Each structure stands twice: as C-alpha cells, then as structure tokens.
C-alpha cells in the first residue's frame, strides 16, 4: 500500500494572496496622503543577502511601497553604520527600515539592531519588540516566526494544546517562535531543541508539529516524524552549491502536512515585513 502524500504547505501562494490584500491597504494609505516607504540597508556584497534584498524591493513595487536602497561597503565602521541608522531613524518620510543580516564580521549585529527606533523596526528584532512578544504586548513581530504562525493558521492546523517541537534556538527564528506559539490564545506546548539536546528523535516523534530552523541538511528524517504530523522546514543550507532543506525527502510519505523542498517560508517572511511596514506607516 503506498503511503498517502502530505498536504503541501504552499507559502508562496499564501504570500501572493497577502500581497493582494496589502496592495489594497497601501492604496488606502496613499489616498489619505501617506506614501508608505521603507529602506533596506545592505552592507557588503554577499550574493545571497543581495538577492534577498532584491526580492523585497520587487514585492514593494508590486504593493505600492516606496523603497530606498541603501548599500554600504563591507569595510564600513560601526560608527558609520550607526550614523546611517540614526539618519533613517530621524527621516520623517521613512516609516520603517531593516538592516540585512548577517553583517560582515567586525560589526556587532546586536548593537546595530538595538540602534533602530523600535517603531521603525519592521524586522521585529529590537530588544523592545522581542520583549513585547515575551510580555504578550502588541509590537512588531519578528517576520519568520510570524510567517510560520500565519502558514499554520491558513491551513487550519490545530495549535491549541498541540505538541510542537522547534529545532533551533536562534534569535531570528526558534527562540521568538517558541514565545509566539505558546502565547495565550495560540496555546501550543513547545519543546525548544538545539545542538545540545539529547535524543532529538524521541521528542520530534511525539510532536504534532515539527518546525526545523537549524540549517542542517536532511536533519529531520522520516523515522523522526509521527505519522500525520505537520512538518515545516525553515533552515537553509547549501550542499555543493544547491540549496538544501532541513527536511529529508522521505518525510513526505509520513507527514500529514509539509513545506515544499525549496522552502515555503521565504516569501511569507517578506510579506510579514511589508505588513509591519504598512502598520508602521498607518501608526506614525
Ligand atoms: P542560528 O544559527 O542562530 O540557529 C541555528 C540553531 O540550530 C541553533 O540554535 C543550533 O543549536 C541549532 N542546531 C544546529 N545543529 C543542530 C542539530 N544537529 N540538532 C539540533 N539543533 C541544531 O540560525 P537562525 O538565524 O535562527 O536561522 C535558522 C535557520 O533558518 C538558518 O538555516 C537560516 O538560514 C534559516 N532561515 C530561513 C528563513 C526563511 O525565510 N526561510 C528566514 C530566517 C532564517
């Protein structure tokens, strides 16, 4: 008997739908005399980062958001980058901006993120916005965790009381996601796993939902998945130049829901960034 194939969690299609809604929201703001505007700050010439920024710009054009493309050399000093951030903080026409990570070595990411005005922090990575998430207060949500929650909700995957195994405790994905999914009203039970966790498989096997944000190719194998579970691959790594997911291909034969091998969270993550921007434009 062949195994049933998992339902595909199509984040790209969902992102397209959200783009349509945001286009209408942007048009309403423009009709009120507010032209939504964001800046991206790219330091250095890492090709992956440059391509992420290009995709953000394309989405902005589609929605009707103006973009300022700030590019700085990799050799920039901390004080020069802080001066750029201060200028964007002070520009009243700029509703929000993001500093593309990772930054070249020598620049302390935490210090740069902390320099962004919290009400312009559309990445949701300023300690004040992360603190608001922890405290259950409204604020800008970090984009990838918000994208994952949006995806789970769009496919009606039950969250209240569900056992969720999150693999990876990074500040960008795993750690804030654990806060978001366990918040009151969402009510999932979280186990946050990382490189020091003992017996990963024993935890993932009892989970209703597995979210892997480790960046280790094929980390989650079919034997680690409870039949019918939802499996979300967030981690990205490159094997011989090819983009590879944390989720091994055989998982499709066991999971009930699954993100596609090329990923599903990237386009939705960009949608969450622009949602935060429109919210900032409406609020400022
Ligand atoms: P990070 O490097 O800060 O965190 C990685 C985590 O994985 C760490 O907590 C580490 O303990 C854990 N880990 C590593 N090996 C492990 C193992 N063998 N078993 C269990 N845990 C292990 O990374 P991050 O910034 O949080 O990002 C996580 C991943 O998600 C990266 O691959 C990144 O490229 C990807 N990402 C994707 C998107 C997207 O839009 N698709 C967005 C952001 C990040």
Image (spheres, helix red, strand yellow):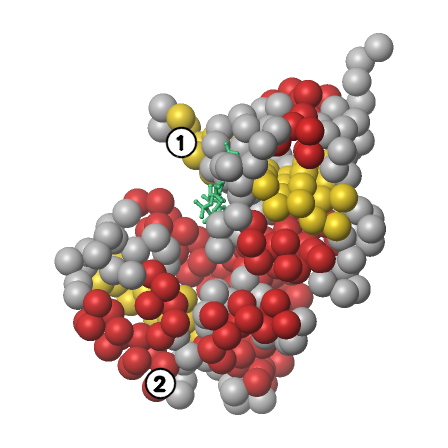
Where does residue 206 sit, x and y in percent of width and height? 76, 33
| Left or right placement of residue 23 versus residue 73 in this view | right
Residue drawn at x 53%, y 79% as measured from the top left: 280
Residue drawn at x 54%, y 26% as measured from the top left: 218
- Callout in the foreground (1, 2): 1
Residue nearer the viewer, 87 or 220: 220
| Left or right placement of residue 113 versus residue 216 in this view | left
Mark 1 / mark 2, whichever is N-terminal: 2
Residue 234 lies in quadrant: top right
Residue drawn at x 53%, y 40% as measured from the top left: 194
Label 2 belongs to which residue?
91
| Image vertical order of residue 61 relative to residue 261, above or below | below
| Image vertical order of residue 130 relative to residue 11, above or below | below
Residue 269 lies in quadrant: bottom right
CB at disc 1 and ligand 1 closer than 8 Å: no
Quadrant that contains the N terminus? top right
Question: Tag 1, which secondary structure?
Answer: strand
Label 1 belongs to which residue?
238
Q: Residues within 10 Å of mark 2 (few under 14, many from 20)?
A: few
Residue drawn at x 57%, y 85% as measured from the top left: 283
The reply to whether residue 31 is visible in this rendering is yes
Where does residue 59 sit, x and y in percent of width and height? 49, 59
| Left or right placement of residue 37 versus residue 141 in this view | left
């Amino acid at each position: 008997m062949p195994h049933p194939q998992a339902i595909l969690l199509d984040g790209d299609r969902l992102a397209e739908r959200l783009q349509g809604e945001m286009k209408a929201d942007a048009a309403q703001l423009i009709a009120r005399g507010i032209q939504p505007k964001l800046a991206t700050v790219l330091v250095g010439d890492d090709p992956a980062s440059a391509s992420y920024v290009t995709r953000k710009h394309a989405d902005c054009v589609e929605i009707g958001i103006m973009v300022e493309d700030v590019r700085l050399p990799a050799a920039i000093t901390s004080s020069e980058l802080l001066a750029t951030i201060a200028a964007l903080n002070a520009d009243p026409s700029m509703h929000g901006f993001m500093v593309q990570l990772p930054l070249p070595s020598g620049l302390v990411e935490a210090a740069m993120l902390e320099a962004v005005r919290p009400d312009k922090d559309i990445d949701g990575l300023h300690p004040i916005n992360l603190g608001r998430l922890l405290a259950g207060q409204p604020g800008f949500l970090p984009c990838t965790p918000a994208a994952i929650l949006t995806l789970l909700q769009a496919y009606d995957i039950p969250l209240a009381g569900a056992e969720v195994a999150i693999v990876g405790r990074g500040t960008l994905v795993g750690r804030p996601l654990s806060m978001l999914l366990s918040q009151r009203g969402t009510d999932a039970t979280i186990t946050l796993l990382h490189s020091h966790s003992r017996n990963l498989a024993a935890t993932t096997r009892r989970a209703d939902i597995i979210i892997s944000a480790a960046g280790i190719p094929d980390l989650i194998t079919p034997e680690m998945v409870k039949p019918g579970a939802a499996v979300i691959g967030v981690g990205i790594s490159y094997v011989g130049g090819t983009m590879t997911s944390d989720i091994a291909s055989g998982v499709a034969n066991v999971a009930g829901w699954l993100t596609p091998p090329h990923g599903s969270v990237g386009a939705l993550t960009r949608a969450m960034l622009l949602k935060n921007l429109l919210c900032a434009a409406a609020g400022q």
